[in-house]
Image: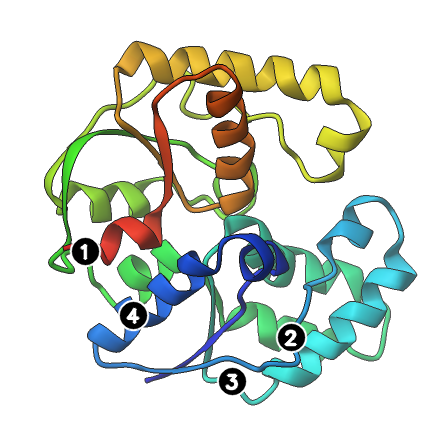
């Protein structure tokens, strides 16, 4: 099928390898991948800070760009939740509500697209080591995604997946939350890092690069050797 990517601005600017990995994997599975170069942001920063009129300006552009898409895939639980869960709320009472609902119906978070839509769990990936999985808040709480990435990781040759005791605890990033409440954000990262340490994992894997950036920054500052990887990077490893 033809898959249209909604690559978050965060990945585009800071972690392009994640977007490239998604493309590589989908093409390896035989699908055609499209990406509208005009896409910049889904509007979530404005939405989360209560600036809904400004968020609608950005979101209307997204509706235009993906209106004809067969399926829309986002390598981020956060951005997928914005389009899938919050666009209908954002446009409630607006003329674009039907278009927002149509986009929501065909938008998928990356791991959910593979497992729930395509029925794929084994992709030939290989990665030696011990890993634990971090559940991003939006993917877990808004989209109910928890089992899908773990089913994919269970099929990665050489990878031992160990659950941490704080698996559903927020990492502390939360977009603008980390900027507004720095001390609380760092304290939350400390809790998460301690939970990771108890697993003795070599890798922390997640489907949200924003969470991974926050955790990796804490690990690096504390000289903790654990490495953060996006799920897509793991699934294209050979």
Assign a secondary structure to mark 4.
Answer: helix
Assign a secondary structure to mark 3.
Answer: loop
- Residue at numbered disc 4: 24
- Residue at numbered disc 3: 69
Q: Nearer the viewer, mark 1 or mark 2?
A: 2
Q: Nearer the viewer, mark 2 or mark 3?
A: 2
Q: Which of marks 2 and 3 is nearer the N terminus?
A: 2
Write the residue at 49% across / 14% down.
Answer: 222
- Residue at numbered disc 1: 121
Residue 214, image x, y percentages:
56, 32
Q: Are marks 1 and 4 in contact (CB under 8 Å)?
A: no
Residue 131, image x, y percentages:
25, 30
The 10 Å Cα crowd at callout 1, few under 14, some 14 to 19, many 20 or more, is many
- Residue at numbered disc 2: 39
Q: Which of marks 1 and 4 is in front?
A: 4
Label 2, label 4: how far apart the Cα atoms are: 20 Å
Q: Do the residues labelled 4 and 3 touch (CB within 8 Å)?
A: no
**Residue 198 image-quadrant placement:** top left
Q: Which of marks 4 and 3 is in front?
A: 4
Q: Which of marks 3 and 1 is nearer the N terminus?
A: 3
Residue 159 drawn above or below residue 97: above
Q: Would residue 126 appear left or right of 23 to someone viewing this image?
A: left
Write the residue at 53% across / 38% down.
Answer: 213
């Amino acid at each position: 099928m033809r898959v249209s990517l909604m690559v978050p601005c965060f990945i585009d600017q800071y972690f392009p390898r994640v977007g490239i990995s998604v493309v590589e994997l989908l093409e390896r599975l035989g699908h055609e991948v499209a990406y509208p170069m005009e896409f910049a942001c889904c509007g979530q920063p404005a939405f989360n800070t209560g600036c809904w009129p400004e968020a609608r300006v950005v979101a209307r552009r997204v509706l235009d760009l993906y209106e004809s898409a067969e399926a829309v895939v986002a390598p981020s639980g956060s951005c997928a939740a914005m389009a899938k869960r919050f666009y209908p709320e954002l446009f409630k009472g607006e003329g674009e509500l039907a278009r927002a609902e149509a986009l929501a119906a065909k938008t998928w978070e990356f791991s959910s697209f593979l497992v729930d839509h395509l029925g794929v769990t084994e992709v030939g990936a290989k990665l030696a080591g011990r890993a634990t999985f971090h559940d991003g808040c939006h993917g877990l709480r808004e989209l109910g995604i928890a089992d899908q990435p773990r089913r994919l990781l269970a099929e990665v040759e050489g990878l031992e997946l160990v659950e941490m005791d704080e698996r559903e605890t927020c990492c502390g990033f939360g977009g603008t939350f980390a900027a507004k409440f720095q001390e609380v954000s760092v304290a939350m990262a400390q809790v998460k890092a301690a939970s990771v340490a108890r697993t003795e994992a070599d890798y922390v894997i997640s489907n949200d690069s924003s969470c991974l950036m926050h955790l990796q920054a804490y690990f690096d500052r504390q000289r903790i050797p654990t490495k953060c990887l996006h799920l897509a990077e793991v699934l294209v490893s050979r």
